[in-house]
Amino acid sequence: MATVLFENARVFDGVSADCRDGVAVLVDGERIVEISEVPIIAPQARRIDVAGRTLMPGLIDLHVHAYASDVSAARIDLADTAYRTAHAVRMLGHALDCGFTTVRDIGGGDWSLARAIVDGIIRAPRFFYAGKIMSMTGGHGDTRSMAESQHIHGYCSCGSMNALCVIADGVDECIKAVREELRRGAHCIKIMGSGGVASPTDPLWMNQYREDEIRAMVGECTERRTYVAAHCHPTSAIRRCVDFGVRCIEHGTMMDAETAEFVAERGAYVVPTLAIGFALIEAGPALGFPAVSQAKLEVAFQSSIEGLRHMRHAGIKLGFGTDLLGATYVQQCREFTLRREVFTPLEILRQATSTSAEILMQDGELGCVREGAYADLIVVDGDPLADIDLLAADGANVPLVMRNGEIVKDVLTA
Ligand code: ZN
Ligand code: ZN
């Protein structure tokens, strides 16, 4: 692998507001090996003059579904594997060009797609995946309409399953389903902890899974030295999931002040996903988002900006997520603009780099510019600490992207 020397960079390290100017960063193979304010002598290296632009960690999106080829869960299932994979290729390539060097696929993504990425068959960010999401029968992961009975959807006979989720009920089934996903290399386990927007038969306010089921799944993850992430909208679900050992809450749209304090006290994380909410509020009907879901969407997301204020006030550590489905994948960078309503650029930059890396249990390895860390780096034309919208332009201000030491986008030196 090549040696690359970035020169004359303004470095944001993923944490500190004090960016240093005139910095040289040496990358050897897949790692950052030296960072210096005096010139680095590396005759064998390819030299790239950053010319005072910002060099920062590649962005991390913790809530994607690469296989979610449609806004309708039922149509994702009917699309079949090749179509879903084609969508994954399209959305992951777009993410990379926007500056995302890592994604966490929090439902549906699998070892096969991960291997295609590692083998370089497709252009994509680093790919952590949760495998299939655990859902109870009639829960947020059960995409069947009332009219359908079991197994008429081509579900396998050993348990109900669709493109993104597996249906597991009771402690024994839950444990078996979790073990199966971990066997297939899942980075973490995702569970449906409350009702959701896109599912046809469950109310949004409903808490899902019993305490013994959640604790059993958390226990399996603890033994595997990983964690459970839970989809939750209402505060009751957020509170009980965190109480039962869930480490990371997804969405958390209806967060109130009291619940935010509780989550912060317990040291759990939240990954808000505003992009999908606002994308579908605007474009849902035109994209064929089911009417019943559109109504739930407005309830779930009407308080989501206010929810962010409660999270900020309580000091919850937040990851960066988008949750975009189907054709809305192009709105990934809009999350920066939406969070700007509540957070400073520095806070948003930390969310999209160092804090998201911490949630991935990759602190010091990803989401930082540090000697010894993986060389996942982007060049930004301008200062994102002063203007976060630089990152909201779909990669237009990100002329160079390096992932794992390899330059995967370059309109800077070309
Ligand atoms: Zn969800
Ligand atoms: Zn999701």
Image (cartoon, rainbow, N blue to C red):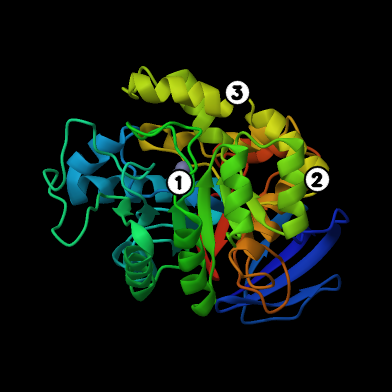
Residue 180 lies, in percent from the top left, at 32, 70
| Labels 2 and 3: the sequence-earlier one | 3
Q: Which mark is residue 302?
A: 3
State the residue in front, 180 or 283.
Answer: 180
| Labels 1 and 2: the sequence-earlier one | 1
Give me the residue at 60% from left, 23% from top: 302
Q: Quadrant of ligand 2?
A: top left
Three-letter amino acid code at the position of disc 1:
Gln
Q: Which residue is mark 2?
A: 314
Q: Is residue 358 left or right of residue 102?
A: right
Position of 286 relative to 185 (above/below): above
Q: Which mark is residue 312?
A: none
How many numbered tags mark residues here? 3
Q: Are marks 1 and 3 in contact (CB under 8 Å)?
A: no
Residue 238 lies, in percent from the top left, at 60, 46
Q: Which residue is mark 1?
A: 208
Give me the residue at 49% from left, 34% from top: 276
- Which-is-in-front pick, marks 1 and 3? 1
Disc 2/disc 3 C-alpha distance (Å): 20 Å
Task: Give the secondary structure at mark 1.
Answer: loop
- For disc 3, the neighbor class at 10 Å (few under 14, some 14 to 19, many from 20) is some
| Labels 1 and 3: the sequence-earlier one | 1
Three-letter amino acid code at the position of disc 2:
Ala
Quadrant of residue 176 in the image?
bottom left
State the residue in front, 279 or 238.
Answer: 238
Residue 337 lies, in percent from the top left, at 66, 32
Task: Give the secondary structure at mark 2.
Answer: helix
State the residue in front, 264 or 368.
Answer: 264
